[in-house]
Image (tube, helix red, strand yellow):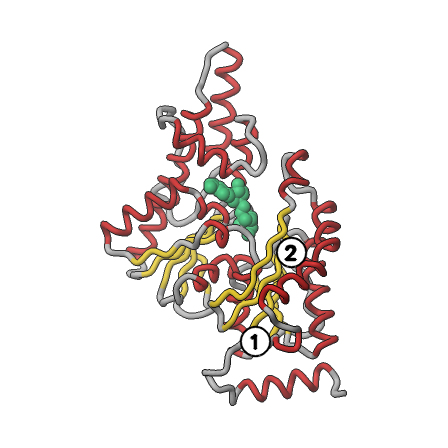
Amino acid sequence: MLSWKKEMEKKLERLKTIDLKESVIILGIETSCDETSIAIVQDGHKILSNIVSSQIAIHKRFGGVVPEVASRKHVEVINVLLEEALNDAKLKLGDISAIAVTYGPGLIGSLLVGVAAAKAISFAKGIPLVGVNHIAGHIYANNLIKQLEFPLIALVVSGGHTELVYMEDHHKFEVLGMTRDDAAGEAYDKVARTLELPYPGGPYIDKLAKEGKATIELPRALMDNGYDFSFSGLKSAVINTMHNAKQRGEYIAKEDMAASFQEAVVDVLVSKTLKAVQEKQVKNLIVAGGVAANQGLRSRLKEKCEQLGIDLTIPPLELCTDNAAMIASAGYFSYLKGEWSNLELNGIAGLPLSP
Ligand code: KG4
Ligand code: ZN
């Protein structure tokens, strides 16, 4: 048997002659946080299987993700998920063109489980390995819905990240702005805790917001100041307002606080995103990450984009939160470019989107 390295060199050489009609099947692995997921995607867009095992029920009682528990749970389920994903797609490991795995950013112990599994399969079966940035994965969730068209602006809003990204081509990320403190999802989760809602709080606030009125005045930070975001002042304003009201024996309806908070977040996200779209003169806007599931954000963006003639894509809810299909889609384009990883691939907790 050829050594792994020699076999990869041979496969890389063959890639240059690949017939575009030949289908490329990517096995995606995602374990960066509290979801273990394995997916199989054909040609970067067709989902053959996408199995997600969420640990939310386990972490709920702690009010947030416990890293050590998360990595142990990934270890427990990853092999079963691999089998399930292959069965669902009616494929064998021998049918897989490459393995795409999230290697950062995320919880280091969790990342290592996915990376170790991917490397083991790659080594044992001689399958090419592609390391994928988790945020790039969120962006490529959109490619599962509609082929990405460049140039585009991507608004990435997740539990750990809030970034405005300009892309001229596949895997060319120019980060225009990011959060200086809390991520949008993090602010949602912390505000939800103050309102005594379960973890993760985003979906609960979203639901409550529909029942309330945005009558409470809250700050909108850095509104006319570049593309960076800041949500920690807004989060503190909610905590202080609720706390002061409680001390004074006054009542604030949780629904109204949820609606006011959501309005402030959506105001900032939408205004900065549209500014980027207009300044960069792009026609295509995509939204990614767990907070892209937010109904308030989705409907405001839809309304504005219709008015301005911007082509808006937002993945369906199940592809907004962590899943391996998005990792496989991002990995597909790296695979085609020959940007493969070797067996030294390691998890990187703070991996940036662009160097
Ligand atoms: O992308 P994701 O699944 O994980 C990370 O990579 O961080 O995002 C999870 C975040 C959580 O903070 C959660 O509260 C938030 O997405 N989220 C929402 C909604 N659904 C999930 N935030 C606001 N509204 C929602 N409907
Ligand atoms: Zn994520």
- Residue 234: percent from the left, percent from the top? 46, 33
Q: Can the viewer see residue 182?
A: no
Q: What's the residue at 40%, 30% (across, down)?
A: 259
Identify whether 253 is placed above or below 272. Answer: above
Q: Is residue 164 left or right of residue 197?
A: left
Q: Is residue 352 left or right of residue 84?
A: left
Q: Count residues near mark 2 (Cα–Cα under 10 Å), then give few for <14, some for 14-19, many for 20+.
A: many
Q: Count residues near mark 1 (Cα–Cα under 10 Å), then give few for <14, some for 14-19, many for 20+.
A: some
Q: What's the residue at 41%, 57% (across, down)?
A: 154
Q: What's the residue at 39%, 28% (across, down)?
A: 211
Quarter of the view holding residue 210: top left
Question: Which dot, 2 or 1, sits closer to the camera?
Answer: 2
Q: Name the residue tied to disc 2.
A: 31
Q: Is residue 112 left or right of residue 322?
A: right
Q: Which mark is residue 339?
A: 1
Amino acid identity at mark 1: Glu
How far, Cα to Cα, is label 2 from label 1?
21 Å
